[in-house]
Image (cartoon, rainbow, N blue to C red):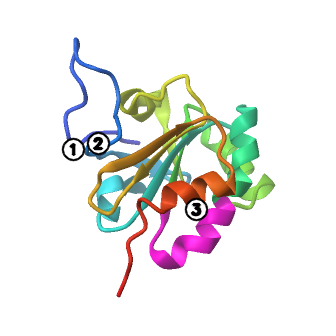
Amino acid sequence: MSSNTDQSPPTSGSRSGLLVGDQAYDFTLSDLDGNPVSLANFRGQPVIVNFWATWCAPCRIEMPELQEAFEKYKGDGLVILALDQDEPVEVARSYFYDEMDLTFTPLQDEGSAIATTYGSFGVLPSTFFIDSDGIVQAIHRGPLTLGQIEGYLADILVETS
């Protein structure tokens, strides 16, 4: 598993995490099968980065909402990267695939390194809506409803003509 950032994260004495309007920090994490996945691979597409854990009750509530949004908007290029916070891969795999039957991309954020860099450590769920240029357009702390997701997606979905 690797976790790195393309851009330097905030240094000591500077603000912590990302704000709306910031360039999203790139990262490379392993999916639940051990394959590397980088945020940079999805440049040009709208991306939702969601920080979650299986033990987080609000995260469990919002997962079906994220799945519904993914099914509805994947044809528009929507990518959802769900960063599981420091749990054994077997636990995440069982929940993500067997229990919830989710089809978007789960990643392992071992040590919550990316959550810390993004400013979401200890705040679950946290969701970042990133446009096709890699700019954070919205940040939501707490569980999302489909209506809220669609409201945020209005800011990041790219019109294709």
Quarter holding the N terminus? Answer: top left
Label 3 neighbourhood size at 10 Å, few (<14), some (14-19), many (20+)?
A: some
Please, which residue is most extreme toward the top here?
13
Give the image location of residue 48, x and y in percent. 48, 54
Quarter holding the C terminus? Answer: bottom left
Q: CA distance from mark 2 to mark 1?
A: 6 Å
Q: Earlier in the sequence, mark 2 or mark 1?
A: 1
Specify start and end residues of the magenta stretch as a single range: 67-80
The amino acid beneath tag 3 is Phe
The amino acid beneath tag 2 is Tyr
Determine the residue positioned at 49% across, 25% down: 121
What element does badge 1 sit on?
Answer: loop
Give the image location of residue 84, x and y in percent. 57, 40
Give the image location of residue 15, x and y in percent. 28, 20
Q: Earlier in the sequence, mark 1 or mark 3?
A: 1
The residue tagged 2 is 25
Q: Which residue is nearer to you in this view: 115 or 134? A: 134
The answer to whether residue 155 of the structure is visible from this angle is yes
Residue 104: numbered disc: 3
Q: Main secondary structure of the magenta part?
A: helix
What element does badge 3 sit on?
Answer: loop
Cβ atoms under marks 3 and 2 closer than 8 Å = no
The answer to whether residue 80 of the structure is visible from this angle is no
Please, which residue is most extreme toward the bottom here?
161
Whether the magenta-drawn stretch holds residue 69 is answered as yes
The residue tagged 1 is 6
Cβ atoms under marks 2 and 1 closer than 8 Å = yes
